[in-house]
Image: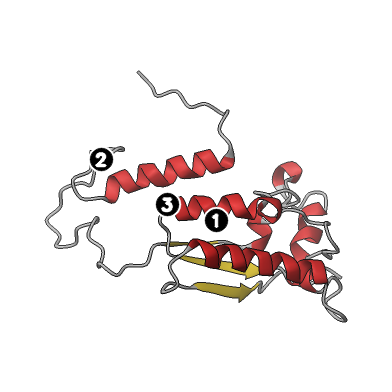
Amino acid sequence: MAPHFSLALSRREFLGGMIGAVALNVLPGSAGGFGGVAETAHPFVAYQFPKDFLWGVATASYQIAGAWNVDGKGESIWDRFSHTMGMVKGADTGDVACDSYHCYKEDVAIAKKLDLKSHRFSISWPRIQADGTGKANPKGLDYYKRLTDELNAAKDPATGDVVSLGFATGAGR
C-alpha cells in the first residue's frame, strides 16, 4: 500500500518531519525510515560523524524572509527578476516565501528543538538600504538585531552563527 501524504502540513511541520526522517537514516541503530543505509565494502560509514560535528542550517534571505515590500525594504534584483512576466515558471516569487520576517521566533524554536548548533544566514541589502545608498533603514536593522538576539538566546554560547551579505540581493534599479 502506498503511503498517504497530506498537504495539510505547514511548512514548519513538513520541514521538521523531513529532518526527522533524514535523521532516522543516519543515526546508529536506526530503523532506517527510508530503507536504512546500504551495506557497502567501502570504509566510509554514513552515520559516523565526529563527536564535535556542528549540525546547523543555512538560509538565504530571499528564499525565506518574504515581506518583500514591508517596513521600508527596497526592491532587490531577485524581486525585479521574479516580478518580470515570463522570467519564472508559474510566476512564482519570494514575496511571502517562508515568511521568516514575521515568523523568525518560531523558526529559531524549531532549530533549537532539532538541537542545531549553528545558523548561516544572509542579510538582504535592500532591507538595510532600500536604494543601495543613503541612510540605513532602522526597521531593517531592527529585524536583524531581533533575529540575532533570538538566535543567541536559543543556543549554547560556545557555538556560533555566520552572517553573509547577500551577494546578489542588491537594489534592483
Residue 21 placed where, x, y %? 37, 42
Q: Nearer the viewer, residue 167 or 89?
A: 167
Q: CA distance from mark 2 to mark 1?
A: 27 Å
Label 3 packing within 10 angstroms: few (<14), some (14-19), many (20+): some
What amino acid is at disc 1? Val
- Give the structural element (helix, strand or loop) at label 2: loop
In the rendered image, the vertical position of residue 131 relative to residue 20, given as above or below? below
- At horizontal 86% and vertical 64% (from top left) the residue drawn is 72
- Give the structural element (helix, strand or loop) at label 1: helix
Going from N to C along the chain, the mark reached first, 2 or 3, is 2
Which residue is denoted by mark 2 in the rendering?
A: 32
Residue 114, label in figure: 3
User: Looking at the image, what colour scheme do you see?
Assistant: secondary structure
Which residue is denoted by mark 1 in the rendering?
A: 108
Q: CA distance from mark 2 to mark 3?
A: 19 Å
Q: Are marks 2 and 3 in contact (CB under 8 Å)?
A: no
Label 1 packing within 10 angstroms: few (<14), some (14-19), many (20+): many
Going from N to C along the chain, the mark reached first, 2 or 1, is 2
Extreme-front residue of the structure: 153
- At horizontal 44% and vertical 23% (from top left) the residue drawn is 4
